[in-house]
Image (spheres, rainbow, N blue to C red):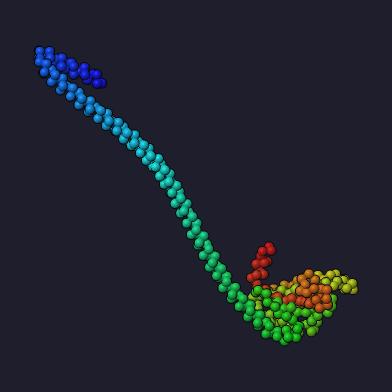
Amino acid sequence: MMKQDLRVIGAVLAVTLAAGGCVTKSTYEKLETEKNQEIAALQTERRALQQQRAELQQQIEALESQRDALDLQKAALERDSVALQTRVGLLGQERASLEQQQAQLKKQVEALEQQKTQLLTSSRQTQAQYDSLVRNLTDEVKKGQLQVRRYKDMLTVDVAEQLFFDSGQANLKDSGKEVLKKVGDALKAYDDKVIRIVGHTDNVPIAKSLQKVFPSNWELSVARATTVVRYLQEVGIPPERMIASGRAEYAPVAPNDTADGRKKNRRIEITLIDRNLVQEVTQAAK
């Protein structure tokens, strides 16, 4: 490029000399000096332009690097935005789920509070019934003829077997009728209860002379419970309120290896059970 510029300048000088004819040496030298100065100025300007071009190229490369970095940041931000939106959606679903669970828990708490209130009311009612039953049978309790027990919402009257029946028999004794009538009168007031009568024996086998009537303690315990149910029906308790069953020797309350233990096991249990509970059990068994 520099050589081409010099040739151009030389040509210009030649044309100038040819046009003007002969010039003096001083004039020629002056012209040459001026042209050299112009050439030096052009060279300086050229270098400056090249320097500017290099700097601009560096700036362009730097800007391109920045652009690439910004593109990466933009892509990352877009991914973060999508992830954030997804997370927001999930959080919204979780919030809705938690609110639903909270509403369900609130209903459960309210139901439990209601059940608690009902249980407290039922417990107070059962306690009042227990106290009333004990008062009505105070004399019999004091004489040791029977025992009144409470378990949760159930009331049970335990009557000694010998008060009602002779050994190996299921016919109700006159001494037992008097006590059983008083028990029946006391139970009439609890028309919201089902009366379950269960016969129990000790583990002594039925005597051979009686096995034709009662082959085992099963038959004897059921027969005794049925006898009690029939008598309670006679004294005015509706039969639909009563259930008769026998457990033989398989639900003892004391060891059968002593006479006193066997005596405790020979008993009649008369239990008051909430009518709704019996219905639930009956429906579940269907």
Give the percent coordinates (x, y) of residue 26: 11, 18
Q: Residue furthest front?
A: 26
Image position of 243 with respect to 11: above or below:
below
Residue sitting at x 52%, y 60%: 101
Q: In the visual, does 258 lie left or right of 13? A: right
Q: Is residue 206 left or right of residue 59?
A: right
Is 159 placed above or below 48 here?
A: below
In which quadrant of the rendered image does the N terminus lie?
A: top left
Q: Give the percent coordinates (x, y) of residue 126.
A: 63, 77
Of residue 52 and residue 271, the one placed in the foreground of this image is 52
Residue occupying the point 72% across, 81% down = 183
Which residue shows up at 65% across the image and 82% down it?
131
Residue 271 locus on image (x, y percent): 70, 75
Residue 230 visible:
no
Q: How many marks?
A: 0
Residue 55 in sight: yes
Residue 143: % across, % down: 75, 86
Q: As drawn, is 65 to the left or to the right of 91?
A: left
Front residue of this view, candidates 22 and 228: 22
- Report which quarter residue 60 is drawn in: top left
The furthest residue to the bottom = 139
